[in-house]
Amino acid sequence: MERLRSELGLMAYLAVCFVLLASPTWAAAETSKIRVVGTYTNLRYSTGSGDLGGVEIKIVPARGRGFQGALQIAEGAPSELMVVDVLVEKNKISFRIPNSYPIYGGGTFEGAIEPAAIRGHFTFGEAVNEEISLKKGLGYWDK
């Protein structure tokens, strides 16, 4: 009886593992060939002006959503954290900032995922900003 119970427990464990591996989040990560999960940043502190400038996003898997990111944009001072749904298709990445966020709401980002960075541009209204590169690694706040 105890042997049957342990075999059933093992089968249940393997079934849960299979379901997790077969989920859309993991499938999306596998098809992109490049690991998108992580922190990407170009945030920099200017000792001359005392300002913080740049962009940082931490991308994580999200059940039923593929990926989500915690985004922060700094123009002199850091913005509030903005949660965005991140779309990944092969090496392309994009997201839209929800309108509920002041200043940056409605803005979009489109770019490409590289092994050590994300390159792309933001669009706010009619203004398309110059291309930026966000290096993968420790975030500004992690240093």
Image (cartoon, rainbow, N blue to C red):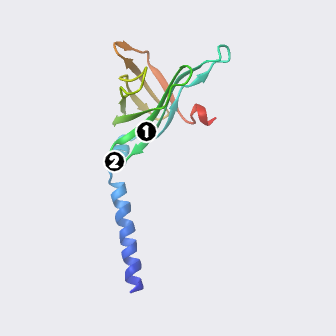
Return the residue found at the far bottom. 1
Q: Give the residue type at disc 2.
A: Ala
> Residue 78 appears at what percent x and percent y?
54, 25
- Position of residue 99 relative to residue 21, above or below, is above
Numbered tag placed on residue 27 in the rendering: 2
Numbered tag placed on residue 55 in the rendering: none
Relative to 142, 81 lies left or right? left
Tell me the quarter of the image containing the N terminus. bottom left
Q: How far apart are marks 1 and 2 (CA)?
A: 12 Å
Tell me the quarter of the image containing the C terminus. top right
Toward the viewer: 76 or 91? 76
Give neighbour class at mark 1: few <14, some 14-19, many 20+ (Cα, 10 Å). Answer: many
Q: Mark 1 points at which residue?
A: 36
> Residue 71 appears at what percent x and percent y?
46, 31
Relative to 31, 143 lies left or right? right
Which residue is painted at 39% across and 29% down in the image? 112
